[in-house]
Amino acid sequence: MSLFDMRLSEIHNRLANKELSVSELTEASFRRIADTDHKVGAFLALNEDGARKQAAELDAQLASGGERGLLFGLPGGLKDNMVTEGLRTTCGSRFLENYDPIYDATVVQKLRKAQSVTIGKNNMDEFAMGGSNENSAYRPARNPWNLERVPGGSSGGSAAAVAAGQVYFSLGSDTGGSIRQPAAYCGVVGLKPTYGLVSRFGLVAFASSLDQIGPITKNVEDTAYVLQAIAGHDERDSTSADVNIPDYLSALNGDVKGLRIGVPKEYFGEGIDPQVKEKVLEALKVFESMGAVWEEVSLPHTDYAVAAYYLLASSEASSNLARFDGVRYGVRAENPANLLDLYRRSRSEGFGAEVKRRIMLGTYALSSGYYDAYYKKAQQARTLIKRDFDQVFEQFDLIIGPTAPTTAFKLGEQINDPLTMYLNDICTIPVSLAGLPAISVPCGLADGMPVGLQIIGKPFDEPAVLRAAHAYESHTEHHNSRPALS
Amino acid sequence: MTINLKDVEHVANLARLELTETEKEQFAGQLNAILKYAEKLNELDTDGIEPTSHVMPMANVMREDQVRPSWPIEKVLRNAPDEENGQFKVPAVLE
């Protein structure tokens, strides 16, 4: 078994037995990136000096003994919208091309405490807006399973890096599916936690009522480790939930006998690839064989979710991105005639097309005369969508369906048709609007491309989501498939 | 509801964006398509339905009004495109 195929617990055994050092592991990660990233494009910046220094310190600790952190020595990536002091953070945007953060995001501090090694910053759609990584201002990331296809987005670089064996985990962020959809397209595991479980302090804001950070890994057990390291209340994020954090690793134990699963018929509607449907139905048979029961259910407002989401998320974005004004950081236009000219030209030079489009849509939806018709109406639709889930969860423990209606599409195929691109998120957006935890796990290949199975839980019931995902994984081999990447 | 070029210019002004003629035409078309799709929401009867701004039950979070250390000014200005005497510098606001 190659180093890249090992799980975190196996790596830890090797480190403890002195069969491997953190420096060796770190160098292996950089070597793999040197060998593959000219094809994959998963990284925007590498933390070579910092990571090597960190690895040497951890090796010294390994020699002297002492308690080791939860993610000790593990090379990891970070989506480039989480700020890192001393390591450029661009958000995939020209606007922040030279942005040098003055502090670390809470998740970055937590990773340091857990003693993982930060390898670098992962590529992404600009300001996390997009589902293909083609909106990166630098270069598109590509799908390791087929370099002609997109890795998904907006955390495309994070998912591609894990799938390519460049890092053991990466943190992504999910607003309408941006962890789960790229995880599905790249054949890896991606968890969007319940809204508020992980601090957003130091995450560059896109849509504050939806944004949530979560892990992308090769298997469910590793996801539980990473989640354990990053979850928890943070006084610097007043929307972070003040709840007790359970032991996610022990939650993996136990079976799914008697588990009640609802399968929403709307997630198999128009636009679903028959092969994706077949893989999801096969996965449900696996759950049946383990003693779970499933039944078709209805989430009747699913069809309204994409419309509501694009109005709400764009409105929040238009407000959040007002801070990029060319005054305190980022791009400043040359020779401005006055302050207004400075704002307008700095923003117009710094932002790409998708970001401008969403700012325009959000500004329009919030503008005088249209607020009730668009913004408020979308907020009311959000209430109805959330109620759909509440009702199903009165009778069921989990909801299972596809993560995305198709497998990864080709680069360039949808870039000029924003609406079609938005509809790829039909199965992930309703879950985001309801703030629920959901994981995508690999459930097979369709024409050589990975298919993702989405397991959705009640608020803060990550333990049930992880247990079901782990049970499924233990009975299947899909998570062990790796792209050839030749 | 259709958006014309004048609407696009008005919204761009509100959003502090300066668009090229090509961008204006492109956005008018794309925003019309997106808003037409969003009209789907009008099928929903939302009379008496509370709008959801946040999914989790949440209230204002208060803390004691105590003085805490802040960032040193050199750090805060590290990314400033222009600065003078420990302050961000912008073009004159008053004529």
Image (cartoon, coloured by chain):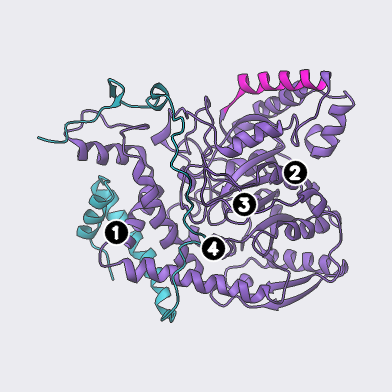
Chain colours: A purple, B cyan
On whether disc 3 and disc 4 are found on a single subunit, the reply is no
| Residue position for label 4 | B57
- Is the magenta region chiefly helix, strand or loop? helix
Q: Residue furthest left?
A: B95
Q: Quadrant of residue A470?
A: bottom right
| Residue position for label 2 | A225
Q: Chain of mark 1?
A: B
Q: Secondary structure at mark 4?
A: loop
Residue A247 — which label? Answer: none
Q: Relative to the observer, which residue lies in front, A444 or A124?
A: A124
Q: Nearer the viewer, mark 1 or mark 2?
A: 2
Q: Nearer the viewer, mark 4 or mark 2?
A: 4
Q: Nearer the viewer, mark 3 or mark 1?
A: 3
Residue flagged by tag 2: what amino acid is it? Tyr
* Magenta segment: A46-62
> x, y (%) of residue A472?
81, 59
Q: Chain of mark 2?
A: A
Q: Nearer the viewer, mark 3 or mark 4?
A: 4
Confirm or deny contact between disc 1 and disc 4 (CB under 8 A). Answer: no
Inter-mark Cα distance, 4 to 2: 28 Å
- Mark 2 packing: few (<14 Cα in 10 Å), some, or many (20+)? many
Inter-mark Cα distance, 2 to 3: 15 Å
- The answer to if A48 sits in the magenta stretch is yes
- Mark 1 packing: few (<14 Cα in 10 Å), some, or many (20+)? many
| Residue position for label 1 | B28
Residue flagged by tag 3: what amino acid is it? Leu
Q: Nearer the viewer, mark 2 or mark 3?
A: 3
> x, y (%) of residue A25?
76, 26
| Residue position for label 3 | A197
